[in-house]
Amino acid sequence: MRTPQVFGRPVRTARPRVIALSEAARPLWRTVRRYARILDETLPEVQAVFIERTAEQTLRVAACLAASECSETVTVEILTAASTLVRRSVQEAVRINKGATAPKVKR
């Protein structure tokens, strides 16, 4: 495997890491997935396109938070923080796009 470069220098880590969901956080993860599914099914399509993959984004944010704490485990507290951030983002996306007829395409 090739070492990634940052500012022209190789980045070395002690070892590859895997960030995993703790057993205690699994029920909350199921709730996050259910929340995302409900949003996808209830919002109009023009709004739903802005919040696709809500559950996956929550997991990504949680992994970043865990990594920032040098942890290999996503705890309930970390998943709660990630979920709160993503939920707020979803609320803002829906609020901003309320009444929109179609997503705007920049060309």
Image (tube, rainbow, N blue to C red):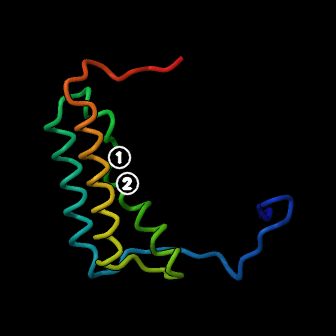
Residue at the image position 23 percent from the left and 46 percent from the top:
91
Image height of 99 relative to 12, above or below: above
At which x and y percent is residue 61?
Answer: 42, 62
Q: Where on the picture, by quarter, is residue 43?
A: top left
Task: Identify the element where label 2 is drawn.
Answer: helix
Task: Work out how far the residue at label 2 is from the one at label 1, CA to CA, in angstroms.
Answer: 5 Å
Residue at the image position 37 percent from the left and 74 percent from the top:
21
Residue at the image position 44 percent from the left and 60 percent from the top:
60
> Disc 2 designates what residue?
56
Image height of 14 relative to 12, above or below: below
At which x and y percent is residue 32?
Answer: 24, 60
Q: Where on the picture, by quarter, is residue 28?
A: bottom left
| Mark 1 neighbour density, 10 Å: few (under 14) some (14–19) many (20 or more) | some
Q: Nearer the viewer, residue 94 or 4?
A: 94
In the image, is 16 to the left or to the right of 81? right
In the image, is 17 to the left or to the right of 28? right
Q: Which mark is residue 53?
A: 1
In the image, is 69 to the left or to the right of 87? right
Identified by mark 2, the residue type is Glu
At which x and y percent is residue 13?
Answer: 72, 77
